[in-house]
Amino acid sequence: MARKRKKIKAAGKFGAGYGRNVRNRFNAIESLQRKTQPSPFHPTGRAKRIAAGIWRCLKTGKVFAGHAYYLEEAK
């Protein structure tokens, strides 16, 4: 019989020492920042996070500064 495994996503690098709530919050932020965000330079353009606060528009190629984790506020 197959062993049951937990799906812990990006927080798996922390191990068990940090607790469930911290890992869940980390997964929520991590999943938002890895997605492409709407670009402010082009109506249909998308922006990808390069580093904390540094973004690149995939349509125009412009590199710009913005919020650290995501460009638009979470709804």
Image (cartoon, rainbow, N blue to C red):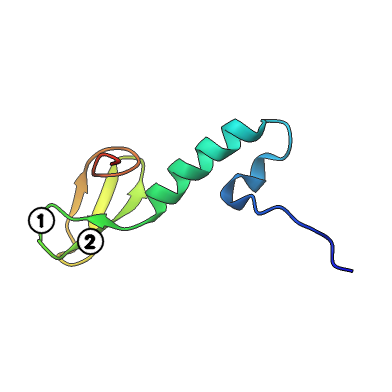
Dot 1: what SS?
A: loop
Q: Is residue 25 above or below residue 58?
A: above
Q: Residue at x 52, y 44 (%)?
A: 27
> Which of the 4 image quarters holds residue 15?
top right
* Residue nearest the observer in this picture, 2 or 70: 2
In space, the residues marked 2 and 1 are separated at their CA atoms by 9 Å
Mark 2 Cα shell of 10 Å, populated few (<14), some (14-19), many (≥20):
some
Q: In this view, does 49 lie to the left or right of 28?
A: left
Which amino acid type is shown beneath numbered disc 2?
Arg
Q: In this view, does 40 lie to the left or right of 20?
A: left
Which amino acid type is shown beneath numbered disc 1?
Phe
The number of numbered badges drawn on the structure is 2
Mark 1 Cα shell of 10 Å, populated few (<14), some (14-19), many (≥20):
some
Q: Residue at x 52, y 39 (%)?
A: 26
Q: Is residue 3 above or below residue 69?
A: below
Q: In this view, does 43 lie to the left or right of 57?
A: left
Q: Which residue is drawn at 28% across and 45% down?
A: 54
Q: Quadrant of the C terminus?
A: top left
x and y percentages locating residue 62 in the rendered image = 17, 57
Dot 2: what SS?
A: strand
x and y percentages locating residue 63 in the rendered image = 20, 53
User: Which residue bears the numbered disc 1?
Assistant: 41
Q: Residue 46 carries which label?
A: 2
> Which of the 4 image quarters holds residue 48?
bottom left
